[in-house]
Amino acid sequence: MSLTVRVAVCTRLDAHGLDPGGLQAAVVRHGDDVVLVDDLCGDEDALGSLVAGATDSRVVMAVCPDGPSSDEVRARARRAGLDTGVGALRVEPVRAAEMGNETGALGRAAGVLHAAAARLSALPTSSPDAFRLALPAGEISRRSLLSMARTSYQPVAIVGQGACPGTAVCSLCVEACPVDAVEPAGRIPRVVKDRCIGCAACVTACPVEGAVRLPGADLVGFEAQIDALVTSEPGAGILVACRGAPPVPPERLPAGDWVSLEVPCLSIVTPGWALQALRAGAPAVAFRGCGAACGARAPERVEPRVAFAREALAATGVEHPGDRVIVLFPEDDEETVAGGRRLEAPASREGSGDPVRLREPAATVSVVAGGVGVLHSAGSPLGMVSVRADGCTMCGVCAKVCPTEAFRFDEGPVAATLDLDRDRCVACGHCVAICPEHVIEVERGADLESLGAGSASVKRSTMARCQRCGEPIASSAMLDRIRAMLPDDPGVMDTVEGLCLDCRGR
């Protein structure tokens, strides 16, 4: 089944200073399918008429500032028979037109719509059970309740999909949830739908692609959107804004053109978002949140991540990193405007040509590997691992609980090897907690010079094999540890070193 993505432009945009016909022509130049729809914002049946039963369609709705909300767009998609989560995407082109030079207003609005279409094209279908029905706040009439006219469909996370390693190995999504909606129940975590606020913190915390899903918030969609923004509007900064954040006062952004993309919550943002967008060619990246009103406590997550991104940029030779990665919360708006403070526009940067990748820790490693220095930062998506090799007994349990396979243990025919890939460590600390010899330490941060080198051997130890059947018994390091623990009885060690467990039983 082929997927059709169309951009629908509301004809009432001209009342807000944006020419619908000119916008249509500008988006068509990007190669998108664009149609003008009379009163797309006000006509609740317009979306259904547009797709005409084609359930494999997806629509970018270019709506007026006073047009339908994201909740209403999801409800309209559902009534039209489309995917509730990704069947329709709301975009305000007027806001995009206002973010920069007047002569480029139409181009910015078209670029934002083109990028939104790229995002919809990349998103997987939503699971029907990835929503919860929500009633509006305040009083509701009996008629509205029975007709479900004012209900909305709130997306919730689905955890444990695909290659999820399960709670025995990984609990990163559980730890990331700010409202305890993800519980370590059973073999895989489960989501308590009534608690989930759809912030997508679990999506970005999961190191396994596809294991955690939130309708419309898959990282592959945002990757395609950022790529398209950089390509369609070169030289424009990228504003990543929380869905609940108020508009940014113009005085708060550096001079120049800006294009935006909307996320469920800034909790989804990691240092890799800024680093990848800058490497792709964006001159600056700004993050706009809803501040203290955030139910997911996003400021506590974002600020240290932004600090790490700036430190990493400086360590890789980028000048003025504070002007390249910016965080904007509403609490500072009045002070900034009143004080007349204006950020300087950062210099442009030539793109690398590599596609944007947002899955951590690879998103950060691919940009900062080869930099100079060691960064100790709570906002780092990476961990710095140290192993006291002389105390390691080669038991291999660290590798069994590592959710990203940063540790790998192999019992070969001649020797056992323990390898470590520092690019994969996410500082979960599972290896520290389970190590019986307490020889592993992990600190959140990044040793930039050690990144990008791939796996390296931590320890290698020869294997003792059963004298009867030839099966491996244990590494020499493990046998040395057993010898130190047992009484001085050569007969006991002869048995331990000479026979495997099965043969000892016989």
Image: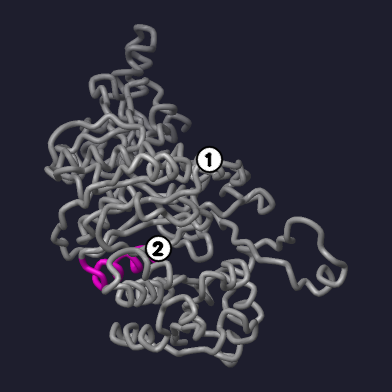
In the image, residue 504 above or below residue 141: above
Q: Can you name the residue that lies furthest to the right here? A: 142
Mark 2 and mark 1 in contact? Answer it, CB < 8 Å.
no
- 405 over 222 or under it: above or below: above
Q: Give the range drawn in magenta.
A: 220-234
Residue, x 33% and y 43% (percent of image)?
340
Residue toward you, 200 or 255: 255
Q: Of the residues tagged 2 and 1, which is closer to the observer? A: 1
Q: Where is residue 250 in the image (x, y as percent from the top left)?
A: 36, 55
Label annotation for residue 396: none
> Where residue 261 is drawn, which disc sits there?
2
User: As shown in the figure, which amino acid type bears the numbered disc 2?
Assistant: Leu
Q: Distance between the residues labelled 2 and 1?
A: 21 Å
| Residue in the picture at 50% in, 53% down | 245
Residue corresponding to mark 1: 292
For the stretch drawn in magenta, the main secondary structure is: helix
Horizontal placement of 44 versus 335: left or right? right
Q: Is residue 232 magenta?
A: yes
| Residue name at image x 33 percent, y 15 percent | 483
The foreground one among 66 and 90 is 66
* Residue 324 in view (yes/no): yes
